Image (cartoon, rainbow, N blue to C red):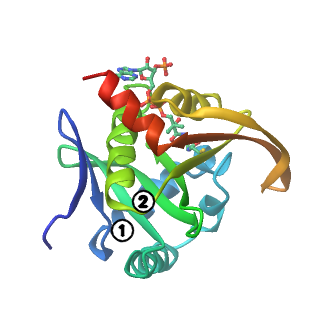
Amino acid sequence: MPVKVLCQAGDGIEVRALHRGLAARIYQMVRSEHARLERFLPWAQHTQSLADTLNFITQARDAFIQGKAVHGGIWVENDLVGMMALEIRSPNDQIANIGYWISSRSEGKGVMTRALRAFIDYSFSEWPVHRLEIYCATANVRSCRVAERVGFQKEGTLRGARKVNGEFLDMNLYALLQPDWRARGKAAG
Ligand SMILES: CC(C)(COP(=O)(O)OP(=O)(O)OC[C@H]1O[C@@H](n2cnc3c(N)ncnc32)[C@H](O)[C@@H]1OP(=O)(O)O)[C@@H](O)C(=O)NCCC(=O)NCCS
């Protein structure tokens, strides 16, 4: 299967399109880390079998064909270490959400920060998007730090806005506008 690279972040870090051949690998990653992922990602508790992951990849492919979303795997060289997704939330307003996770063995090394910067470039270049949003639970300190590190601004806290494991979590809303991202890129040379 030809590899479709969505974006490159240097040092062998890439975001590549998903395909069904990755289902077993993704399923194993999610299951082996389910306790950690389930803390903040509601979908993780619904991944109970390989069929669930195959179903997810099929839905992701359909959403891509319809121009509604793109899901990618985060790779370091030939190692699949995490996932990243862009989902159009409001086509008329050109607003999209970004979501991400990385395996524990690749956490704390800056891989997500670099992959996310490349994925933001890709999103603003290849998709009809003016505003990107990230929703992070207030307790998800690592994720909030990633959003802030790459330049998202916190616009507020939505109280009890996501139900995970029967608990209603407060969610920080972060946003980044395309002109601000472009201006930062120019300023950085
Ligand atoms: C949220 C999550 C993606 C953050 O991953 P992460 O590895 O901490 O993020 P980064 O890649 O930015 O790594 C940051 C760390 O790498 C270090 N680092 C090393 N080199 C770096 C570089 N070149 N650039 C940036 N940071 C670098 C930073 O100092 C930081 O260290 P710290 O953890 O001691 O503060 C990860 O914790 C995760 O997947 N959690 C579970 C799922 C989840 O919560 N997803 C988000 C839902 S909103």
In percent of width and height, residue 97 lies at 56, 55
In percent of width and height, residue 174 lies at 63, 39
**Callout 2 crowding tier (Cα within 10 Å): few <14, some 14–19, many ≥20:** some
The numbered dot on residue 74 is none
**Callout 1 crowding tier (Cα within 10 Å): few <14, some 14–19, many ≥20:** some
Mark 1 is on which residue type? Ala
Question: In the figure, is residue 13 to the left or right of 97?
Answer: left
In percent of width and height, residue 86 lies at 47, 58
The numbered dot on residue 28 is 2
Question: In the figure, is residue 104 to the left or right of 153?
Answer: left
**SS at circle 1:** helix
Mark 2 is on which residue type? Gln
In percent of width and height, residue 48 lies at 58, 70
Question: Residue visible at 50% across and 29% down?
Answer: 151
| Mark 1 lies on residue | 24
Marks 2,1: beta carbons within 8 A: yes
> In the rendered image, which quarter contains the N terminus?
bottom left
